[in-house]
Image (cartoon, rainbow, N blue to C red):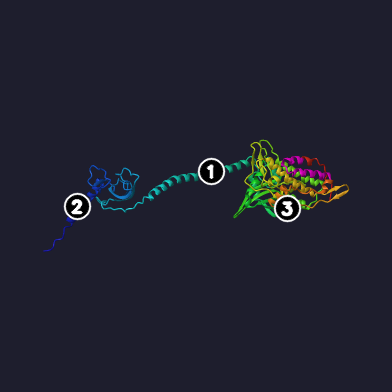
Amino acid sequence: MAAMAPSPGRGAHKHGVIALILCLLVLQREAWGLLCYCEGLCPDHNNFNGTCEAKPNSFCFSAVETVYDVETDQWKEERTYGCLGPDELGLMQCRAYLTKHQRPKNISCCNESDRCNEHLLPQIIHHKPSVAPQGNFLESLLLVTLPLGFVALLAVIMTVWFRYRQRESSMLEYNKPLGLVIGPNDTLSDLIEQSSGSGSGLPLLVQRTIAKQIQLVQSVGKGRYGEVWLGRWRGEKVAVKIFFTTDEASWVRETEIYQTVLLRHENILGFIAADIKGTGSLTQMLLITDYHQLGSLYDYLQNTTLNYFSMIRLSLSTSCGISHLHTEIFGTKGKPAIAHRDIKSKNILVKRNGECCIADFGLAVKYVSENNELDFGNNRKVGTRRYMAPEVLNETINMSCFESLKMADMYSFGLVLWEIVRRCASESGDRYLLADEYQLPYFDCVPPDPSFEDMHEVVCVRGVRPDIPLRWHYNEVLKTMSKVIQECWHANPAARLTALRVKKTLYKFHVSDGTKIV
């Protein structure tokens, strides 16, 4: 008898019944939720049977906490079991709050089967009480400082941006009403005449344009602040003073002084432009002025013998320049009074017409009587020791009094007049007396580069002044100049002549250019 094969219909029916039962179980779980083991954090403490029902799509959890026991002053681990809320894996629905002595450490979840969390053991993380307070303090500190730091950084950025925009807009406003454009055939004289007429120089944008077009020809001198070059702009000669990077304060100050309203004067060095040029690793601070081929008064006197006319012309023009500096001009756009603070023959230039002009304003001080304020700028350097007044050398000068600064200028100017008059030949009766050779003040009393102590000893302690040659007493012109000089370098600042007084005195001389003395 042949063996009977199993009926395929019956097997398929059996598998279908099993699949139906599984589907019903899944649907039941989705509809009724998950049954979880509960201990410690159960929803209903009055009806506790060791289980809780998680809502559909939720999980069972097992947690480990460290709890601080106040009575024993110790930390201990405590396990809890229960149900999580629907779609919330990080918060426990049955938990109302945590006390300040509790620190949750770790939570593990599952939903594979009913009571799946009963044997779920998350990793125990041991608690160190000394670390927790510090961590909380650092967290609180970061929560406070980070927002404040961000706000402060934002404030700094906004301030810088605002000042930049304010500077740019003020620059545009400064140039806008002038409508000054450099034409192809314009000369420097044309541009200056077209400017505002306030005597404060060309507009800033025009200055930058000119500075970029300057061609340096050759070096013509060096000083403690930088190097002076002969330059050309459209064929015109200009002087270009290139400051050392360590003397940026001098460049800033001199630029400010030259751009002072109503400063332009025939006996003040003509200012053209100022700019900063960067060439990769090199930064150049440029100051562009009129070029005077005869150079400084110091250079000019060494090679030139003067007659009465040229001596008076040099002296009078210098006094006019200093007088213009010292004078305050009142008005809507007035000029402040300015003290030079470094008057010497090297800072005075000789023009082709035989007059002088004052230069080098890196140490200058502004004064406005209306608010009684002195503006020293950011440059704290002092003047040239050889030309310092006694009150500067013995440090008794009142730096808050502008009159004291003016009188210190007049002492230095007295020494410059002495240098000029020495180079003037004279006549006595029918005899011509040759001029003395050029020398610096106190050449016979101090070394070539005197120290502060050297000058203090000679000027203040011993009360020495440069020698007055005997021949000056036999000539009325030189005798009058001698008197002016001695009143300028008087030990008492209040007894010194003002620049205006010297100017009026020298105006009284009526000396013809036809007087030739060789």
Q: Residues within 10 Å of mark 1 (few under 14, many from 20)?
A: few
Query: Which sits earlier in the primary sequence, circle 1 or circle 3?
Result: 1
Residues shaded magenta: 475-503
Query: Which sits earlier in the primary sequence, circle 1 or circle 2?
Result: 2
| Residue 420 visible to an observer of this rendering | yes
Q: Residues within 10 Å of mark 2 (few under 14, many from 20)?
A: few
Cα–Cα span, label 1 and label 3? 53 Å
Work out whether residue 331 or residue 123 is closer to the camera in this orientation and state it.
Answer: 123
Three-letter amino acid code at the position of disc 2: Val
The residue located at (45%, 46%) in the rendering is 145
* Tag shown at residue 17: 2
Cα–Cα span, label 1 and label 2? 79 Å
According to the picture, the residue beneath numbered tag 3 turns out to be 446
Q: Nearer the viewer, mark 1 or mark 3?
A: 3
Residue farthest to the left, as pictured: 1
**Image spot of residue 440 (x, y percent):** 75, 51
* Tag shown at residue 159: 1
| Quarter of the figure that contains the N terminus | bottom left
Three-letter amino acid code at the position of disc 3: Val
Three-letter amino acid code at the position of disc 1: Thr
Callout 1 touching callout 2 (CB < 8 Å):
no
**Image spot of residue 70 (x, y percent):** 32, 46
Q: Main secondary structure of the magenta part?
A: helix
Question: Which SS class for mark 2?
Answer: helix
Q: Nearer the viewer, mark 1 or mark 2?
A: 1
